[in-house]
Image: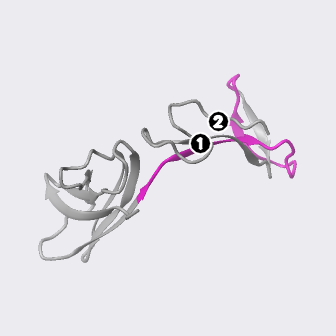
Amino acid sequence: MVNPYVTNVTLRKKQIVLTIKVDDYPPGEDLEISGQATQNGGAFAVFNGIKQVPEPNPDGTAYIYLEASPAQDFEKGHDITVVLRAARVWTTVLGESPEPESSSHAAQLPTTTGKTESSDEGTSWNKIRAVTYAGPSSPGNAGQNPTGSEASFPDS
């Protein structure tokens, strides 16, 4: 699979609009897009969002558009460097392991009664309860379900 990449950056109403080519992702799949655009002289913008891959155009291309507010204005005549990360979103629910490694108190955790309960230093949450994949049209990998479907809870 070819990684997504930025094909165009346009300044519109004090926002930069990034055009991101996503031809090789399945239509309907959600992608988390994040990164930054920079320019010599100090201009930069940080962007982040979750976008759904659209149906491809008749020529097979598909694009996602993402806006960002520059912290400092971009200037004509200077190249822009864009660092882009695109990822499928996975959610994992972890249960607490039965035995903490130490007994000194560290974090205060809320309980269902509204009071806080201390967790011990060294407490681990390493028992996998569920793993879900956030793509609406992709089934994920073995034993993993799309978000919104029934989560998988292993017995052990």
* Residue drawn at (12%, 72%) of the image: 76
Q: Quadrant of the C terminus?
A: top right
Please name the amino acid that badge 2 sits on.
Ser
The number of callouts visible is 2
The residue lying toward the viewer, choosing from 11 and 144, is 144
**Magenta span has 111?**
yes
**Few, some or many C-alpha atoms within 10 Å of disc 1 (few <14, some 14-19, many ≥20)?**
some
Return the x and y of residue 9 as percentages of the image width and height.
20, 62
Return the x and y of residue 59 as percentages of the image width and height.
18, 55
Mark toward the start of the polypeptide (2 vs 1): 1
Return the x and y of residue 31 as percentages of the image width and height.
40, 49
Left or right, residue 66 beside residue 89: left
**Magenta span has 132?**
no
- State the extent of the magenta-drawn residues as a range: 86-114
Left or right, residue 143 beside residue 81: right
Q: Which residue is under mark 2?
A: 152
* Residue drawn at (77%, 39%) of the image: 118
Please name the amino acid that badge 1 sits on.
Gln
Return the x and y of residue 73 as percentages of the image width and height.
20, 64
Position of residue 102 relative to residue 151, above or below, is below
Distance from disc 2 to disc 1, alpha carbons, whole Å, reads 7 Å
Secondary element type, mark 2:
loop
**Few, some or many C-alpha atoms within 10 Å of disc 2 (few <14, some 14-19, many ≥20)?**
some
Position of residue 115 relative to residue 138, above or below, is above
Secondary element type, mark 1:
loop
Instruction: Give the number of the disc on residue 144.
Output: 1
* Residue drawn at (73%, 46%) of the image: 125
**Quadrant in the picture for residue 24:** bottom left
Left or right, residue 64 beside residue 108: left
User: CB atoms at circles 2 and 1 under 8 Å apart?
Assistant: yes
